[in-house]
Amino acid sequence: MKDPYSVLGVSPGASDEEVKKAYRDLARKYHPDNYHDNPLADLAQEKMKEVNEAYDQITKSRAQGGSYTGGSYSSGSSYNRAYSGNAGGRNTAVRSEIKSGNIGYAEQLLKQPGIPHDAEWNYLMGSVYQCKGWLDEARRYYQTAVSMDPNNPEYASALRMMTMGGGFYRPAAYSRSSMDNCDCCTTLCAADCCCECLGGDLISCC
Amino acid sequence: MFGYVRPYKPELKVKEYEMFRAAYCGLCWSLKEKYGGIARYIINYDLTFLAMLLTESECQPEICRGRCPASPCRKKQYLKSGDAFEFAADCSVILTYWKLMDAARDGGFKEKLVSLPTAAALKGMYRKAEKAQPEFAAAAKRLLEELSELEKANSPSLDAAADKFAKILEAAAVGADNEADRRILSQLLYHLGRYIYIIDAIDDYDDDSKSGSYNPLIYRFETGGKKLTEEQREMLETTLRHSEGLISSAYELKNKNVYDPILSNIIYLGLDNISQMVFQGRGSELKYTNTIHKSRS
């Protein structure tokens, strides 16, 4: 078992607040939402487990008298796509191969002659191509699946992720937003001033 | 020529910028030491990134000073970082050689005139690099040939063409101690290769349309050589961001090393900055200069 402090990247002398912050930053980084449909999702899940265990161990050992408040987050979301949908014999086999990571074999099964190229086939082709990293082809297949079966939530969700360019973690320092930490407070102060000029008071202490 | 994989300088700390320059010089030094002075001129930012990425976690680079043909009056600092830099030097020679051979075989008259004698001059260096990295050399040769076949067939699949180049970079995922690390490096390098190929296609689109050379975007979007539409550009931007995300999510699972601040800057800011420059039509600023202080606007 690795040293829990080194897992969280803090020194053993760090304050409870510092430990909590380090844990939150790592939990945000390895959260399942950031590894949805990512071939490395299982590794992220292991990392998240390691981080949770380290935080639990530290908080337990620092607690006074055995019981402690707070603990690690349990992730409500899943790392892996839950494969559902029609249980056609061949398609079930394909879904199971994709889930196991046997992408090459899944592709072979889908490209066999005589298989109907229906909405589900297009969706599964998209999944195979997404696993291979052929993101442009994956998007095209998902688009076809959605156009053939617009009400299917599974296909719509897959297409939505592709058109968003995936959902990934970014460190706060590298945020895409042009706002920085000061903008929020400055905006509120400005809003408070305007409010007071009009006879109201947004922030009573300013 | 100098490479697309560069940091976004405005967000680098001064010490990080200096370390990056010293790493770049370190690769140049590795090329010179192993392959002779002439090999310096195949130095490239993309391979500098590879060298920094593959450096071991425990490695503390040695800071040295040496003479530089680009700076004759003042000695420059360079980093000696061990195996990863030597490996990147080997890969630089291999990739340059096969790209030249490719141009010599398939290029126009002017291209053949330049690439044939240059490839011949590199042959001795190539043999040495091939001996050091036989698997990488074999993969580079095979995949560039397969890419050439796809290009001759005017392949309409952007991913199929990008896949060949991506797999070359993926072949550089060596030195991993275990399966998990190998998977992490493979995903990172595959999508980096994909990013480079697509960015290069966007950058060369106008020239290729005019000259009639193969460009995967012409066939993917059936443009007939006309300018890319706003919708097509958005799709390309999205797919590039998606690859950038797969690179960064892999990087966060990797054991970090001394170059982490520079690598993070490149992955989270640099790649996107370069994409924006290329989409704005400023690719020539990258191709023919080795500056890294060009910003977004």
Image: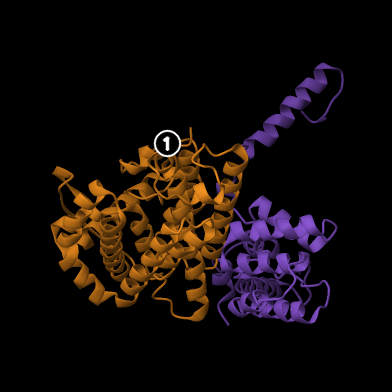
Chain colours: A purple, B orange
Neighbour tally class for label 1: few under 14, some 14-19, many 20 plus, Cα within 10 Å:
some
- Residue B233: horizontal and vertical position, in percent? 57, 42
Is A175 situated left or right of B112 in this image?
A: right
Question: Compared with residue B47, is residue B127 higher up or lower down, i.e. above or below?
Answer: below
The residue closer to the viewer here, A199 or B31, is B31
Q: Dot 1: what SS?
A: loop
Question: Compared with residue A10, is residue B289 higher up or lower down, i.e. above or below?
Answer: above
Locate residue A75: give its quadrant: bottom right
Total marks drawn?
1
Locate residue A179: give its quadrant: top right
- Residue A89: horizontal and vertical position, in percent? 79, 82
Q: Quadrant of the N terminus of chain A?
A: bottom right
Question: Compared with residue B110, is residue B138 higher up or lower down, i.e. above or below?
Answer: below
The residue closer to the viewer here, B246 or B15, is B246
The residue closer to the viewer here, B26 or B191, is B191
According to the image, label 1 marks what residue? B282
Answer yes or no: is residue B34 visible: no
- Residue B21: horizontal and vertical position, in percent? 31, 50
- Residue B202: horizontal and vertical position, in percent? 47, 45
Is B195 situated left or right of B111 in this image?
A: right
Is A91 situated left or right of B262 in this image?
A: right
Locate residue A20: give its quadrant: bottom right
Chain that bears disc 1: B
Q: Quadrant of the C terminus of chain A?
A: top right
Q: Residue at x 72, y 25 (%)?
A: A190
Q: Residue at x 34, y 72 (%)?
A: B136
Question: Compared with residue A178, is residue B116 higher up or lower down, i.e. above or below?
Answer: below
Q: Amino acid at mark 1?
A: Arg
